[in-house]
Amino acid sequence: MRVLVVEDEPRLAANVAQALRENAGYAVDIALDGEQGLYLAQTAEASGYDLIVLDLMLPGLGGLELLKRHRASGARTPVLILSARDEKESVVELLNAGADDYVAKPFDLGEFLARAKVLIRRGKGHCTPVLRVGDLEVHTVERSVRRGGRAITLAPMEYRVLEYLAHRPRAVVSKTELLEHLYDFNWEKFSNVIEVYISGLRRKLDDPFADKLIHTLRGQGYVLRAAEAAEPPATA
C-alpha cells in the first residue's frame, strides 16, 4: 500500500512516515506544503494512493482547500486529517468537504495506525481486517498469512504483494500497478522484483496445494482468485 503524508512539520512528517513503513509495511511519500501535496495527489491519481494523511495548517495552500480541490477532481482516495483544531464546527466542515476521518494532535500512534488501516480497507471495499480468498487468510493487523489452516511464513515484500492482491481479488493487477503501490517515488521501477516476489509466493502458497491461487495473464498482470466451485450435477 502507498500513502501520501502532507505535513509541514518535518519531524512529525518523518515520524508518521516511519511508523507507517515499519508498523504497516506501507510505502510513503512526504509533501511539506499544500501545493506539493496537491500536485503529488493528482499526478499519482492514475494509479492512486491508498491513503492521504493531511495536516490542515499548511503553508501556501491550506489543508481544507487542498481537500476540496482534490475531491472536486473526482478523486476517491481516503483522507485522514491530522490537526490541532478539534472544534466541533471544524470537524463537521472537514467531513462535509470529503474527509473520511479525523485525528486531533497530539495523537496516539497506535490509534493513528489503526485508523489508517481501517480507511485503506474500507477504500478497497473490505470491512474486516482478515482478507479471505478461498482457503487463504491474510490477517492485515498482525500481517500474517494462513492457507488451509496452515501458517505461511512470507518475506516482508512477499507479504506486501500478497496483501495488495488480496485487497483486489479476481481483478487483474499489472506489474506497473504493483510497483506504484509498493514503492515510493525514490524507487527505480525498472526491474524484475515483482516477478521475483510472485515466484516466491507461488512456491509458498501454491506449490503445496492442488488448487492454485495466483494466476498470470500474459501481457496483462496477475490475478489472485480461488478455483471456481464445481457445479452440482443436474437432476432429472
Image (spheres, rainbow, N blue to C red):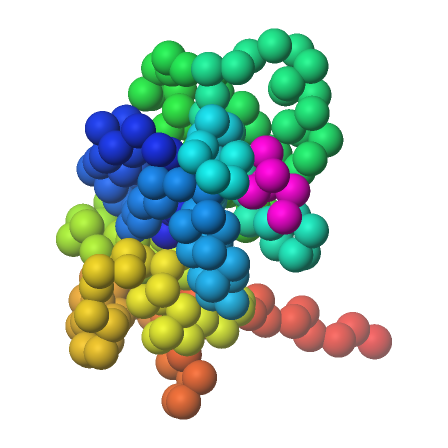
Q: Quadrant of residue 102?
A: top right
Residue occupying the point 33% across, 20% down: 110
Answer above or below: position of 160 versus 142: below
Image spot of residue 163 (x, y percent): 37, 52
User: Residue at 51% across / 67% down in the picture?
Assistant: 46
Q: Is residue 67 above or below residue 173?
A: above
In the rendered image, residue 78, in percent from the top left (x then y), is placed at 55, 42
The prevailing secondary structure element of the residues shown in magenta is: helix
Query: Does the magenta segment cover residue 209?
Result: no
Residue occupying image coordinates x 40% and y 69% = 177
**What is the magenta range?**
64-69
The residue sitting at the right extreme is 236
Q: Residue furthest bottom?
A: 219
Query: Total marks drawn?
Result: 0
Which residue is found at the position 65% from the left and 71% from the top? 231
The percent position of residue 62, horizontal first and vertical second, equals: 52, 35
Q: Nearer the viewer, residue 67 or 205?
A: 67
Q: Quadrant of residue 18?
A: top left
Which of 219 and 128 lies nearest the eye of the viewer?
A: 219
**Where residue 72 appears, x then y in whole percent?**
69, 51
Quadrant where the C terminus sits is bottom right
* Residue at the outermost top position: 87
Q: 221 and 38: which one is in front?
A: 38
Note whether residue 109 is visible.
yes
Query: Does 82 sit left or right of 124 as displayed?
Result: left
Q: Is residue 80 visible?
A: no
Front-most of residues 172 and 9: 9
